[in-house]
Image (spheres, helix red, strand yellow):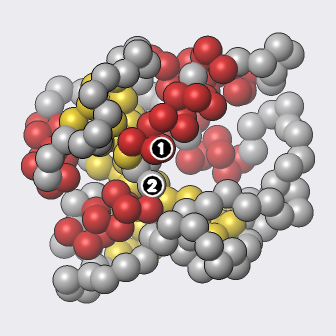
Amino acid sequence: MRKITANAYMTLDGRGEFPEYPGSDRPSDGVSALFRHLWFDRFDDVTTVIMGRRSFLGHQRTWSEKAVKPGEAKWLLDYRRYLDRVEKICLSHRLKSTDWENSRILKGDLARILTKLRHENGGNIMLEGGPAVVRECLRRDLADDYWFFVMPVVYGKGPRYWGPMDKQCTLKLVETKPGEDREILLHYEAVR
């Protein structure tokens, strides 16, 4: 059965935003160790990426190969090529079609969608859904593990990862990795 991992990119106050902070705007010819661990090291075992509508459209606009810029670093092109070739699932009730290759749009109950995908052939599944989707995974215990990329900023605005829970969700810390710009990556497994 396929493993489901939920990724969360958040500020210290649990906001799903990407604010600027010292070092965050530094141009890089090479991929950072944290980004490599979060994405590149998983290219071979993750064959499906799930996103909410806004995240899907934003990724398509920013990260597809069609958005490549002249003289761009090789690691960015590698990332773009991965996103273009991997199966992408867009969770949306409003979006009716997409022209991003290897994509499909699904709607309905998140638990049913994930159960169906878990039983399909393929490698592991990465959920890049955004705060609402990750929060729902936590609330309903739908993912096997969680990767929290925490930026060193208290931001105070933007969508929240944390919200009401029906019950406690216990996670087991697997690893922590510091980033070069004071970010931290926290990897947890669901305790069931």
Q: Is residue 130 above or below residue 3?
A: below
* Classed neighbour count for the residue bearing mark 1: other residues with Cα under 10 Å, few (<14), some (14–19), many (≥20): some
- In primary-sequence order, the first of circles 2 and 1 is 1
Q: Position of residue 116 (x, y in %)?
A: 11, 40
**Residue 9 can be seen in this image:** yes
Q: Nearer the viewer, residue 138 or 1?
A: 138
For mark 1, give the secondary structure. Answer: helix
50 left or right of 81? left
Query: Which amino acid lies under the numbered mark 2 shown in the image of this protein?
Result: Gly
Q: Position of residue 176 (x, y in %)?
A: 59, 67
How far separated are the C-alphas under marks 2 and 1?
Answer: 6 Å
**Residue 148 can be seen in this image:** no
Query: Which amino acid lies under the numbered mark 1 shown in the image of this protein?
Result: Ser
Which residue is at 46% across, 44% downward?
Answer: 54
Residue 31, image quadrant: top right
45 left or right of 29? left
Q: Nearer the viewer, residue 91 or 97?
A: 97
Q: In the rendered image, which residue does mark 2 sit on?
A: 130
Residue 55, numbered label: 1
Which residue is at 37% across, 21% downward?
Answer: 98
> In what quadrant of the picture does the C terminus appear?
bottom left
* Callouts 2 and 1 close, C-beta under 8 Å: yes
Q: Position of residue 114 (x, y in %)?
A: 19, 47
104 left or right of 85? left
For mark 2, give the secondary structure. Answer: loop
